Structures are given as structure tokens and as C-alpha cells.
């Protein structure tokens, strides 16, 4: 199997038919599943991404409201937990809106809502805040999955549990809008080539709207040591991620929470830097992504 960009694979989902699953709220959450996918046993380089299976799901949002949390998990058909390493990454996005900063991709990149790597990091927005979604919004989730250890694993699912407050409840939450920051403007989901003992990739940009930064999450591949977002006008580090490791594989990249919140401005320039080391032990394939969760000064500027 040839590895293709998840973004390119998902581009084929431009036409949403009646078979798209409806995400209807129940008990304060909406739940989407990606799968089933059969995962082959690893052969050769344990860190190679060659041949990783991909799977996508199409969803429609049943009613308007706000997403307040994200709890990803890998499970079998019966709901039994499976190892997080069976997931490489998943991106959940709204197709009817374009991305702010992934401007050089070969296809129009949709607006990212949520994402996770194999660490399956859970995220809860601050109380009183939510990611706004509209009734009927066309959403997809595209995943690249990992390899099973020992014997192949069949019937694996990525289960995305999202806390949800419907608009009809009468509760009005303050909006938080995700902004995908990537070291490459093309935002290639299959990664970029890294070589040598140390590889540094940087990109400068401005935020698409001004507001308050509440949370940020980071994503790197194995071999990634540092992911830093810096405000260039004064050299201030807005956020720094240093992944923790276990057996040469990333074990965790915790969510960064800001208290007090950090101000971001469209008039400022920022730099994102991704640093890889000892890449000879890995697949020579890197990613450097920060997802910033920003409360916009004016919601209309972010739509």
C-alpha cells in the first residue's frame, strides 16, 4: 500500500450523501467513529510510516451548538480499549470552511476542528467556552493508523467523544476557534523529509484574527524534540512543547493551558520552529504542528 496524504484522501469526500453519519447529541456529548480498519503486523523498521492504513468517516452535525471537549480513544467493535499506538494521527474538520494558513496545499484544506496523535491527548475547554458548530455542517474525520505488534489487528476504531452543548439548551457559550499552525504552508499531512542528526524547520506567519489564546496542542513524529511558537517583535516564547519519550517513541505531548490568557494579534509576526534530533533511528519523516485555540475579539473575523 502506498501512503497518501490524509488530506488528499479526504478531498474525495467533497460530495456528502445520505450515508454520512449524523452526529446527534446524547447525554451531553456527540460521538463519532472512524473504522473499522484492519491493521497489519509491523515488519521492518518499527518507525517507518510506509504502508500505514488510512480510513475516513463522513459526518453531519444534527444541530447547532458548541463542542466543549475532545476525548479520543482506540477501541475494537465491542468497545474494548486498544493501544493508542494503533493510531498515527486523526484530523477532524469542517469541509464547508477553508483553512486560514494552509495556503499552499494542492487541495483546499478544510477548517480544522480537532486533532490527535497516538498519544490520544484529551482536551477540555475552559468552563463557559466552546467551539461553535452549525446544524447541517459537513464534517469529516480522516485517520492514518499504525501497525499492530505481533499479530495483525482487525476491526479497530478511532472513537471521538466530544462534549456538546446544544444551542437549544439556552446556554450561550463564548466562542473558541482552532487555528492550525504548521511549519510548512502546504501543511502536508504525510509529513516532510528530515535528514541528518539534527533537523530544524521554521515558518513565519501572522494570526488570521486577534484574540485571546486559551489552549494549544502540539504534534510531532518520533525524533521530534522541540516545538516552539515565538512572537518575533520581542522574542517572547508563546508556547514550547518538549515531547516525553518511551522506547524511542513519543509518549506524551501535554496540552498547554494559559493562565492568564495570551494575547495574539494580526499585526504581529510569529515563528513556529520544529526541531528533530537522532532522526537516523526513525523514518526521516517529520511534522511540526501547533493547534491554537483562540477566543476571537470578534467572531465574524474568524468565520
Image: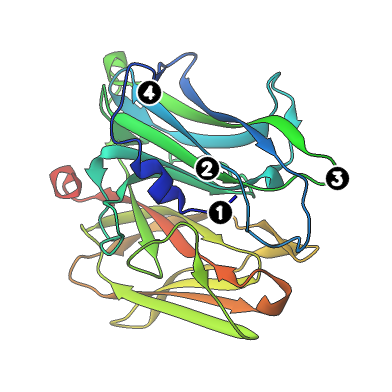
Mark 3 or 2, which is nearer the eye? Answer: 3
Of residues 157 and 166, the one nearer the viewer is 157
**Which badge, 2 or 4, comes first in the chain's sequence?**
2
At 30% across and 22% down in the image, what residue appears?
171
Of residues 160 and 128, the one nearer the viewer is 160
Asked if marks 2 and 4 touch (Cβ < 8 Å), the reply is no
**Mark 4 neighbour density, 10 Å: few (under 14) some (14–19) many (20 or more):** many
**Mark 1 neighbour density, 10 Å: few (under 14) some (14–19) many (20 or more):** few
At 70% across and 78% down in the image, what residue appears?
280
Of residues 297 and 259, the one nearer the viewer is 297
**Which badge, 3 or 2, comes first in the chain's sequence?**
2
**Which badge, 3 or 4, comes first in the chain's sequence?**
3
**Image x and y of residue 220, in percent:** 56, 63
Q: Please say whether residue 278 is visible from this viewpoint.
A: no
Asked if marks 3 and 4 touch (Cβ < 8 Å), the reply is no
Identify the disc placed on residue 165: 4
**Mark 3 neighbour density, 10 Å: few (under 14) some (14–19) many (20 or more):** few
Mark 1 highlights which residue?
A: 2
Mark 3 highlights which residue?
A: 150
Residue 240 horizontal side relative to residue 150, left or right: left
At 65% across and 71% down in the image, what residue appears?
223
Compute the Cα span from label 2 to label 1.
Answer: 15 Å
Of residues 257 and 183, the one nearer the viewer is 183
**Image x and y of residue 8, in percent:** 39, 49
Does residue 8 lie above or below 244 as drawn?
above
Mark 2 highlights which residue?
A: 143
Compute the Cα span from label 4 to label 1.
Answer: 40 Å
Compute the Cα span from label 3 to label 2.
Answer: 22 Å
Q: Secondary structure at mark 4?
A: strand
The quarter of the picture where residue 72 lies is top right
Compute the Cα span from label 2 to label 4.
Answer: 26 Å
Does residue 82 lie above or below 271 as drawn?
above
Amino acid at each position: 500500500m502506498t501512503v497518501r496524504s490524509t488530506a488528499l484522501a479526504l478531498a474525495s469526500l467533497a460530495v456528502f450523501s445520505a450515508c454520512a453519519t449524523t452526529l446527534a447529541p446524547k447525554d451531553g456529548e456527540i460521538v463519532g467513529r472512524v473504522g473499522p480498519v484492519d491493521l497489519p503486523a509491523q515488519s521492518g523498521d518499527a518507525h517507518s510510516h510506509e504502508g500505514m492504513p488510512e480510513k475516513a468517516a463522513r459526518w453531519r452535525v444534527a444541530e447547532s451548538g458548541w463542542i466543549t471537549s475532545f476525548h479520543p480513544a482506540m477501541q475494537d467493535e465491542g468497545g474494548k480499549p486498544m493501544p493508542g499506538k494503533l493510531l498515527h494521527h486523526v484530523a477532524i474538520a469542517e469541509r464547508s470552511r477553508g483553512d486560514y494558513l494552509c495556503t499552499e496545499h494542492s487541495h483546499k484544506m478544510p477548517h480544522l476542528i480537532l486533532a490527535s496523535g497516538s498519544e490520544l491527548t484529551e482536551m477540555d475547554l475552559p468552563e463557559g467556552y466552546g467551539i461553535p458548530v452549525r446544524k447541517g455542517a459537513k464534517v469529516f474525520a480522516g485517520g492514518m493508523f499504525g501497525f499492530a505488534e505481533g499479530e495483525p489487528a482487525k476491526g479497530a476504531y478511532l472513537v471521538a467523544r466530544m462534549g456538546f452543548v446544544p444551542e437549544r439548551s439556552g446556554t450561550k457559550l463564548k466562542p473558541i476557534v482552532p487555528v492550525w499552525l504548521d511549519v510548512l504552508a502546504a501543511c502536508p499531512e504525510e509529513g516532510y523529509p528530515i535528514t541528518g542528526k539534527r533537523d530544524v524547520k521554521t515558518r513565519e506567519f501572522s494570526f488570521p484574527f486577534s484574540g485571546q489564546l486559551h489552549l494549544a496542542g502540539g504534534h510531532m513524529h518520533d525524533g521530534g524534540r522541540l516545538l516552539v511558537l515565538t512572537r518575533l517583535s520581542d522574542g517572547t516564547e508563546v508556547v514550547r512543547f518538549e515531547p516525553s519519550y518511551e522506547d524511542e517513541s513519543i509518549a506524551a505531548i501535554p496540552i498547554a493551558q494559559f493562565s492568564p490568557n495570551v494575547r495574539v494579534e494580526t499585526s504581529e509576526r510569529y515563528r513556529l520552529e520544529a526541531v528533530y534530533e537522532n532522526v537516523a533511528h526513525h523514518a526521516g519523516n517529520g511534522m511540526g504542528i501547533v493547534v491554537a485555540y483562540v477566543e476571537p475579539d470578534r467572531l465574524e473575523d474568524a468565520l
